[in-house]
Amino acid sequence: MAAIDCAHEPIFLAVFKTMGPTLALLGAIVAWLANNLISWCAWQVVRSVRRFEAMKALRAEIGAFEEAEIFYADKTKLEAFLQQLKTDLGPYKPWAPYVPVIDRNPVYDSLMVGGALPALPSRVLESIVNYYSSLEGLNAQLKDFTSETYTKLSHPRQESVIRDLQPLSQDVEETRKSSLEAINYRLTLYRFAPPVFVAAGVLVLIICLPPLVAAADRFAQAFISAAEWASTCDVLLKDNGK
């Protein structure tokens, strides 16, 4: 071990004596910032997981409604449906067919009530709101088949109302495709995000680790040297002062 020169106080010790309170304050600030940064990162991870699960559930719900929505979008199917009504119901009965109506949207409704819907990415949020708004319009028209006002209309007018379902259904189909495209795009990004972040973290660690190790080694040597000087020379100086 090298001899200790008590005539020269180590720079580390001198700096600590003169700037100790300042360094302690800076250390507290850095620790507070690091704690908040870690909390923010954890919040972002939880938020991303919730977004991912919410979009998967919305995709399943939107896909489950497809067959009921697109029936009237096909002009050929719509004409065949009208012809069947004319044959089955006769010329005097009202054309008020029984049709399946999607009365509840459990996933969308739960996200809306729980306040999780606005947290979705903006493009996804816009597309699914457009879809469910279009779906609500189609459902309102389908429910109207059983209303007294509709059943009292003439057959030509009832036929016209049924034909009006085609643009409504087409709009639902277009918004459905748009919402699924937006959701699938975001889900794809979420699947690639963890490997990318891990790779970036490993790269940063590889780049920063050697300088950090070298800096820590220099700090340890300076600290040990200062501690040895303080434990040896301070005692000698105090004894000589007596």
Image (spheres, rainbow, N blue to C red):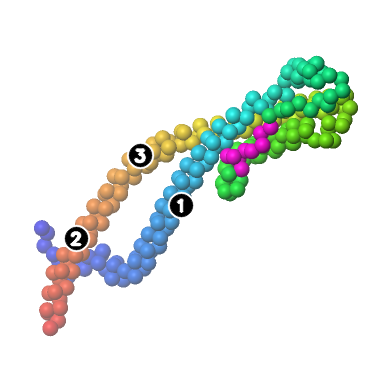
Q: Which residue is mark 2?
A: 224
Vertical placement of residue 82 versus 27, above or below: above
Does residue 176 belong to the magenta stretch?
A: no
Using the rendered image of the protein, determine whether residue 134 is visible from the camera's viewpoint.
no
Gap between marks 3 and 1, in whole Å? 20 Å
**Displayed quadrant of residue 14:** bottom left
Count neighbours of disc 3 (C-alpha within 10 A) and say few if under 14, some if 14 to 19, many if 20 or more.
few
Q: Over which residues does the magenta segment extend?
A: 101-109
The type of residue carrying mark 1 is Trp
- Work out whether residue 122 or residue 146 is closer to the camera in this orientation and state it: 146
How far apart, in angstroms, are the residues tagged by discs 2 and 3? 31 Å
Mark 2–mark 1 Cα distance, whole angstroms, equals: 36 Å
Can you tell which mark lies on residue 202?
3
Q: Nearer the viewer, mark 2 or mark 1?
A: 1
Q: Compared to 21, does 150 lie above or below?
A: above
Q: Which residue shows up at 10% across the image and 58% down it?
A: 1
Work out whether residue 40 or residue 28 is closer to the camera in this orientation and state it. 40
The answer to whether the residue labelled 3 contacts the one labelled 1, judged by CB atoms less than 8 Å apart, is no
